Image: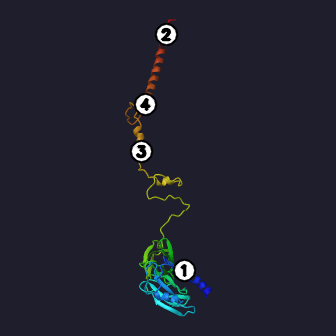
Amino acid sequence: MRIRSAHRLSAAAVTVATATGALALAPAASAKTPEPSPSTSATALSAAGNGSVTILKKDPGGHVLAGATFTVLDSIGKQAASGTTDAEGQLTFQDLAPGVYRLKELSSGSPLHEVIDDQDVIVTPGADTPLTIIDPFKPASVRLKVKDDKTGKLLSGSTVNIGSGDKTILTLTTGSDGAASGKLPINSRTGSDFWVMQVKAPAGYEIYKPSKAFKAKPGAPVTLTVTNAKTATTPPPTEKPNNKPTDKPSDQPSDRTAPDKPGQEEDTSTPSVSGTPTSDETAASIAAPAPARSLAHTGADATPWLIGGAGVLIAAGGGALCVARRRPTDNSTDDGSTAS
């Protein structure tokens, strides 16, 4: 009997650790301090060879819980004792024969707390076995809905993460009804702070990027609603790489022709007004000096006529000179022939 009791004690310790290990800030059930003071009757029963079990009931915040109901079952599953914690959160089961019992919590006595899992308790002869039991807070029930921001239609295929601080606690994906449900652990009477962030949008919708903060209380339902806008049917134009030149035609005339477009100069040059001198011609006319001491022109140049006249005069003068020299010669000959 003692060997079996020791074996079951080990199993009981594992059960307690499993039941309380998932609770944030909740210590495991323990038979250590604070220990309830054994009653006088329990001491008397211990002297008679029987034992007792005294329970101290608390929540994760250290508050004692009154009104929690427990029952003790013997090795064949028969109820050996039952009771409810008092205003101090205590309950004592007296006059229990030595052996292994199954402790079962029927009610936490509080709308904010859950009951713990069943666990084994060993009753030793002539001794009181103290147990400190921590009831976790009830989780908050979360209901997620994802809707179209225009029509309110529920959308499937949306995935969100729910967390606290820098940790993700719960991931939900909406089904065909556009909704999803889950549970969030709570570690305070006043509730816990959480955030929700959409990580996948429904098909054909833009993802909702900002995170939303919310608070959940023990045992209270919370409804989260995320709205999504449809993806734009006409995406904004974006520049795509191609083999065409990057220069784009301008509405205004350009003063310079692109090197890779021959013949552009003739097409884009501004036509000048007929008869209007250009700036270069004007500058040239202004810079050209007038001839010094030039005569006024009357419509024809007389220089050739003057040169021709001078030539005639010279020729006539020369002819007269020859005639004058021949005359004396002729006269001398005539005279000589007469005298002879």
Q: CA distance from mark 1 to mark 3?
A: 103 Å
Frontmost residue, 109 versus 86: 86
Q: Which residue is mark 2?
A: 332
Q: Which residue is mark 4?
A: 303
Q: Are marks 1 and 3 in contact (CB under 8 Å)?
A: no
Callout in the foreground (2, 1)? 1
Amino acid under label 2? Ser
Mark 3 or mark 4, which has the lower sequence index?
3
Callout in the foreground (3, 4)? 3
Q: Secondary structure at mark 2?
A: helix
Mark 1 or mark 3, which has the lower sequence index?
1
Amino acid under label 1? Ala
Mark 2 or mark 1, which has the lower sequence index?
1
Q: CA distance from mark 2 to mark 3?
A: 81 Å
Q: CA distance from mark 2 to mark 4?
A: 46 Å
Is 56 rendered above or below residue 257? below
Mark 2 or mark 4, which has the lower sequence index?
4
Q: Secondary structure at mark 1?
A: helix
| In this rendering, position of residue 121 left or right of residue 87 | right
Q: CA distance from mark 1 to mark 4?
A: 138 Å
Residue 212's spot in the image, x, y percent? 44, 74
Q: Secondary structure at mark 3?
A: helix
Frontmost residue, 251 versus 106: 106
Callout in the foreground (2, 3)? 3
Answer few, some or many: residues within 10 Å of disc 1's Cα (few below 14, many 20 plus, some between 14 and 19).
Answer: some
Frontmost residue, 233 versus 84: 84
* Residue 114 can be seen in this image: no
Mark 2 or mark 3, which has the lower sequence index?
3
Q: Which residue is mark 1?
A: 17
Q: Which residue is mark 3?
A: 279
